[in-house]
Image (cartoon, rainbow, N blue to C red):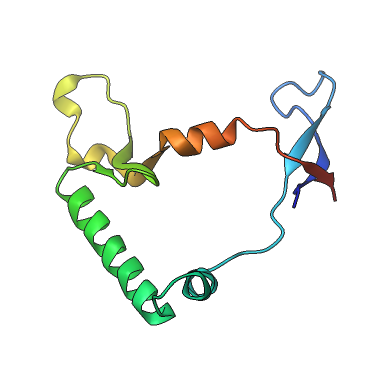
Amino acid sequence: MALPYVISHRKNSLHPNKESQYFLKLVQNNLVDLDHICKEIEKESTLTAPDIYAVAVALQNKIMEHLANGNSVNLDFLGKFSMGAKTKACTEKELVTAKSIVKFHINYQPSAKTKKWLKQDFVLKKK
């Protein structure tokens, strides 16, 4: 298999007098959902798709529970998850409160094995 890409064109909206640029942009072929992955794992193991699905749902619930308690979650071969927040800046320390949070997000750091995998020479295919 190969990673599909397109050549994209972008104008510089901040500096309209500067030349526009072209760059390679990776595109996704399809969206693979949990149901599809469960069926694939079912074919490769002794587990049933409903068992795999139940474990995935329980894992999600436990990850959210631990993140909500201020813990980071390290799933070894998958990577590490931690909470993050986008906040409004204030001119004085006393003005910073919990209401300064605009929105929460989850930070993801890939495992060492995944980082090593990312360093390979992927095959690319122009779409």
- On the picture, is 86 further left or further right than 32? left
- The residue under the point 78% across, 42% down is 124
Q: From the viewer's perspective, tell me whether residue 60 is left or right of residue 65.
A: right
Rendered location of residue 12, percent (x, y): 75, 27
Residue 92 lies left or right of residue 80; in this view the side is left
- 59 displayed left or right of 113: left
Q: Residue at x 42, y 33 (%)?
A: 112
Give residue 100's position: percent from left, percent from top. 25, 37
Is 122 in front, or is 85? 122
**Which residue does the image show at 38% across and 81% down from the upper left?**
50
Residue 119 is drawn in which quadrant? top right
The quadrant holding residue 14 is top right
Tally of marks? 0
Query: Does 27 appear above or below 100?
Result: below
Position in image of residue 69 (x %, y %): 14, 48
Q: Is residue 7 above or below residue 58?
A: above
Q: Position of residue 108 (x, y in %)?
A: 39, 41
Residue 21 lies, with reference to residue 39, above or below; the image says: above
Residue in the picture at 26% in, 55% down: 63
